[in-house]
Image: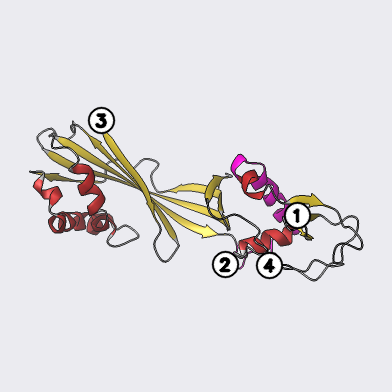
Amino acid sequence: MALPVKLESSSFSLVPSDSKHVIRVTLNRIPENPLFPDSLCTLMVCQKKFHQKRLQIPGLTAILQHRKIGPHNPGLLDHLNFTSLDQFIDLPQLRAHLGTLSSSLKPEIPTLYEDLAPQISALATRSAAMPFCISAEIDIFFTDYVGQNGDLDSSSTDLDALFERIASTAEGSTVLDKFMASSFVAGKDSDKCTICMEEEFDGTSNLIRTPCAHAFHKSCVVRWLIMNKNTCPLCRSQLLDCLHPTTISLY
């Protein structure tokens, strides 16, 4: 049975201190619950898990791979029925109730549902109209970051292609628009890439020029940014604007 249209919603993300998970929470308040018609207030929980491979550079996160873990649609996993609105207002009592969900669903953060008590209470108490139902959609992302496990030994061709994939998106081009493909200019550029210090530049080198006009191997710039270095190796000028971080999907 389809649920009625939502009245209000709240969506936000949590990033635990271990940085291995990203948790996206969507709370919807709907006017009634056909699954539990005798309940005045119901909290329903649906929890899904995903694995993602991400690349992160200053100001931008690119999702390279994305797959679901477990059932395609687990549906309703658990629920709590409340007898009055007061049980949403009393945060210690609400946390205690939500603790039963953390025990039964075993999320990656042991106290995940207790930690959501303030947001759930705020959404429940915006209106005194009853009955109502709050649905909590919890998406847990297990994240692996390129470079995090020493996997930066990708070929220069692969890293060049990755740079182009990011730059081909509208959001990525905005972030990387100040980097320009370039060729070696004798007398102006260093003879070697000052990031890798390995290969001498020549007319066939696949170079990129930074906003401060210095030239490096494109693949070396990608490695440099993945290491969260956001200043030019030569002049220490800032390379990317981090004031408006964005996320793009490349899968």
For the residues marked 2 and 3, what is the alpha-carbon distance in whole angstroms?
43 Å
Few, some or many residues within 10 Å of mark 1 (<14, 14–19, 20+): few
Q: Give the amino acid at mark 2.
A: Asn
The type of residue carrying mark 1 is: Thr
Which mark is nearer the camera, 2 or 4? 4
Tell me which residue sits at (66%, 49%) in the image.
176
Q: Is residue 124 visible?
A: yes
- Left or right of 125? Residue 211 is right
Q: Point out the stretch of residues depicted in magenta.
A: 147-171
Q: Look at the numbered disc 3 and give the secondary structure of its residue.
A: loop
Circles 3, 1 touching at the beta carbon (< 8 Å):
no
Q: Earlier in the sequence, mark 4 or mark 1?
A: 1
Residue located beneath label 2 in the image = 149
In the picture, the disc for residue 157 is: 1
Earlier along the polypeptide chain: callout 3 or callout 1? 3
Separation of disc 3 and disc 1 at Cα?
Answer: 50 Å
Which of 13/174 is in front? Answer: 174
C-alpha separation, residue under disc 4 versus residue under disc 1: 26 Å
Label 2 crowd (10 A; few <14 / some 14-19 / many >=20): few
Residue 245, position in %: x, y?
A: 52, 51
- What's the distance in space between the residues labelled 4 and 3, CA to CA? 56 Å
Residues at circles 2 and 3 in contact by the CB criterion of under 8 Å: no
Secondary structure under tag 4 reads loop
Q: Is residue 166 magenta?
A: yes
Per the image, label 2 sits on a secondary structure element best described as: loop
> CA–CA distance between discs 2 and 4?
27 Å
Mark 3, residue position: 3
The amino acid type of the residue labelled 4 equals: Arg
Three-letter amino acid code at disc 3?
A: Leu
- Residue occupied by mark 4: 236
| On-image quarter of the C terminus | top right
